[in-house]
Amino acid sequence: SSSESVGEKLDYKITGIDPGAGIMQATEKAIDEYGLEDWTVTSGSSAAMTAALKKAYDAEEPIIVTGWTPHWKFAEYDLKYLEDPKGVYGGEEEIHTIGRLGLKEDMPEAHQILSNFNWSEDDMGAVMIEIKDGEKPEVAAQNWIDANPEKVAEWTDGVEKVDGDKIKLAYVAWDSEIASTNVMKLVLEDIGYDVTMSQVEAGPMWTAVADGSADASLAAWLPLTHATYAKEFDGKFEDLGISMTGVKIGLVVPTYMEIDSIEDLAK
Ligand code: PBE
């Protein structure tokens, strides 16, 4: 009934994603800092989270998800971030490309392209939406490349072709990183690389770059989201630069929900 609190309606559950995601650690911290001891964040995957969001949204039921921007869900549904007055989820985040130590010496061409890589929220959004609509990730990536030759040319400007050198890109199955990693795979293949995409969890992704079993990853969210990993592996990876600024993580709800702030969950 309408006299039920949002917590009662939701059985005090926030719909989370894969346990290694930085946003999961931030949500545990939010539960702690906002005094939400009745609440838990469930773990699952990005795909399970978006399925739960769709189900709730279609029925106009309440739901709270761990969300981030860029993500196609904001184009698909009317959603809002819950205000975070304590700043637990940080502010403007950045997506960084990270490489293993020695990459520059071993694969200067890939190192150059990965360092040059940057694109906009709209660029990534175009790839994400096509994948969400059922297109194969590599086809959506190729469509974006075909439509944006001048952007790709900026990343590959002056880079010489290689002859089948093997390179491994580690990523997590987050919609944003499925998009970026598929685009980079095709760009590197065009230069002549033999590219493997290795899908892992967040911890193993950072570990792989730090121990050199992966060459690079496009999925490092900083300064806050992956701060624990960046600190743990400090000195064991190279930050190849920022591919996107102004990205964000937080708790996200449909706009039809009457709450506006994480503080409202304590009521
Ligand atoms: N995300 C998407 C990741 C980084 C990219 C926000 C789900 C995370 O929380 O670690």
Image: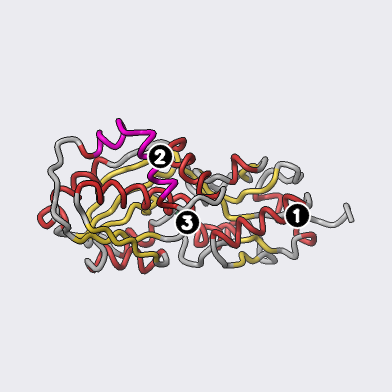
Q: Position of residue 65 (x, y in %)?
A: 62, 55
* Labels 2 and 3: the sequence-earlier one: 2
* Labels 1 and 2: the sequence-earlier one: 2
Three-letter code, disc 3: Trp
Q: Nearer the viewer, residue 171 or 164?
A: 164
Q: In the displayed structure, does residue 142 sit left or right of residue 163?
A: right
- Mark 3, ligand 1, within 8 Å: the answer is yes
Label 1 SS? loop
Q: Quadrant of the N terminus?
A: bottom right
Q: Which residue is denoted by mark 2 in the rendering? A: 144
3D distance between C-alphas at marks 1 and 3: 32 Å
Look at the picture and state if 109 lies above or below 151.
below
Q: Which residue is denoted by mark 1 in the rendering? A: 267
Please check the rendered image and state whether residue 147 is part of the magenta-colored stretch, yes or no.
yes
Q: Is label 1 or label 3 in front?
A: 3
Label 3 SS? loop
Three-letter code, disc 2: Trp
**Over which residues does the magenta segment extend?**
139-155
3D distance between C-alphas at marks 2 and 3: 18 Å
Q: Please give the name of the residue rendered at 22% of the width and 62% of the height, measured from the top-left corner.
A: 236
Q: Which residue is denoted by mark 3 in the rendering? A: 174
Q: In the displayed structure, does residue 105 sit left or right of residue 220?
A: left
3D distance between C-alphas at marks 1 and 2: 46 Å
Q: Residues within 10 Å of mark 3 (few under 14, many from 20)?
A: some
* Labels 1 and 3: the sequence-earlier one: 3
Q: Please give the name of the residue rendered at 80% of the width and 56% of the height, measured from the top-left corner.
A: 5
Disc 2 and disc 3 in contact, CB within 8 angstroms: no
Q: Residues within 10 Å of mark 1 (few under 14, many from 20)?
A: few
Please check the rendered image and state whether residue 191 is part of the magenta-colored stretch, yes or no.
no
